[in-house]
Image: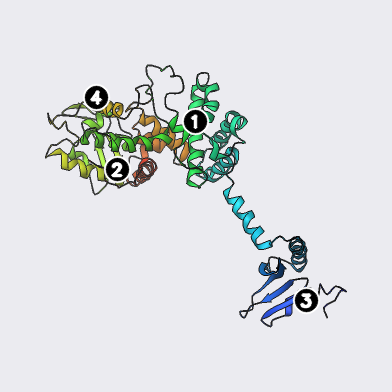
Amino acid sequence: MAKHDPQGIHRLSAAAVKYITAPGWHADGGGLYLEVEPSGRKRWAMRLTVNGKRRDFGLGPIHKVSLAEARERAVEYRSKAYRGIDPVADKRRAKAEARLRAPTFEEAARKVHERRRAMWSNGKHVDQWINTLRDHVFPIIGANPVDQIGTADVLDVLSPIWTSKPETARRVRQRLAVVLDWARAAGHRSGDNPVALIGDALPRHRQDPQHHPALPYAEVSRFIAQLRASNAEPISKLAFEFLILTAARTSEVRKARWSEINIEARTWTISGNDHVGRRMKSGREHVVPLSLRCLAILELAQQLAEGSELIFPDTRSRRPMSENRFLVARDAIGYASDRCTPHGFRSSFRDWAAEETNFPAEVAEMALAHTTKSKVEAAYQRGPLLAKPAELMQAWAAYVCPAGVDSNLPT
C-alpha cells in the first residue's frame, strides 16, 4: 500500500507507478499526478493554480523521469506558483531567451569545427584549423556574440598579423568567413559577411613575381554573383565562370573547342599538343570532369557561338578571345589586380579542397593538372577512378555557385 504523509503528499510508490493501468490522473499529492493514457503510456503531470488560474503541464514520461525526480520538480514548481510565477510561461520564456541568445564567436567556431572535423582525414589539419583561431582570434573577439561582430572586429583580428604573417592571416581570414557564414545560416546573424566587406582596408601584400593573387575561397561565391550581374559581355561572363568551376588556366578555356566536349560522359578532354600548339603546360592530355553548372554554361555558350568550333570565341573576330577579356570583366566588378587574378582561382579551389573536403590531395592535384610522380594520382586518370574528381568538381560548383549548380545565367 502507498504510504501517506500528514500533508497528503507522496501517496504513490514506485510499485504503484509500475502497476497502475487505469487511464486517468492518479494523485501523488501537492499537484503532482501520474497520467495514464488510454494507450497505456504513462507520464508525470502537474496541476497548479497560479494567480487564480489553473495550469496543467507535463514533466516527462516515467521511463525518463523517476518518481523521486518528479517530486523534486514538483517542489520547484510549487515554490514558483506560491510566488506568483507561472511555471509554463517561465519555461517558455527561458527557451525563447536561449534561442535568441547568439553564441560567442568562440562557441560558434568550436561548433563549426566539431561538425566539420569528420570531413577531414588529415589529423594535423583538424588541429591546425581551430588552433589558428585559438591563437589569433579568440583572444580578441572570442567572447563577442557573433551577431555583434563587424568589419572593425575583423580588422582588429587581421591587422596585427597581416604583414608579419601573411599566409597565416590569409587562413585566419578564410576561417573567420566560414564561421560567420555558419552563424548567418543558423539564424544568429543577418546581412553580409563582414570579412567580405573589408575590401582594401588592409595594406597590400608584397607579391612574389611567381605568385598569382587569389581570393579566399569563401569569397568566390560573391565574386560569381557579381560577375553574373555585371555588364561584361555575356560570352566573357560565361568563360570566366567556366574557368572558375573547372579550375583551368585561361589559355585552356580561351582555346576550348566543342570537339573536346563529351556531354554524355560530362567531360572536357584537353590534348597535350595539337595543330594550334601546346595546349597543356605539362604537354599531357587532361580530362576535366564537368559539373551540372558547367553543362548549363555550355548550353548558353552554344547559343552565342553561332557555329564556331570554339566554345568561347571573340564574338567579333571569331578567333579565341584575348586574355584581357577576363581582366576587363574582373575590373568591371571592382576587384583590383593585387586582390585576385583569373589564374588565382586555381589557388582558391586548391585551398577549398584542402580545408573543406576530405578528398585525397591527389584528386585535387589531378583536377589542377599538376605534374607529379605519384602513381596513385596517375591512376585517377584511368577508368572508374575518374569518378572521384567528378565528385570533387561537382562539390566545388555547389559551394561557389550562388544560385545553384545548374541555374541559368542572365545574359
Q: Is residue 47 visible?
A: yes
Quadrant housing residue 223: top left
As drawn, the label of residue 324 is 4
| Residue, disc 1 | 151
Q: Earlier in the sequence, mark 1 or mark 3?
A: 3
Determine the secondary structure under disc 1: helix
Question: Residue 88's quadrant in the figure?
Answer: bottom right
Q: For the N terminus, give its image quadrant.
A: bottom right
Query: Which residue in the protein does label 3 denote?
Result: 15
Q: Are marks 1 and 2 in contact (CB under 8 Å)?
A: no
* Count of all numbered marks drawn on residues in the image: 4
> Closer to the camera, 59 or 61?
59
Q: Closer to the observer: label 3 or label 2?
A: 3
Q: Which is nearer the eye, 346 or 139?
A: 139
User: Label 2 neighbourhood size at 10 Å, few (<14), some (14-19), many (20+)?
Assistant: many
Q: Amino acid at mark 3?
A: Ala
Quickly name the residue at label 2. 290
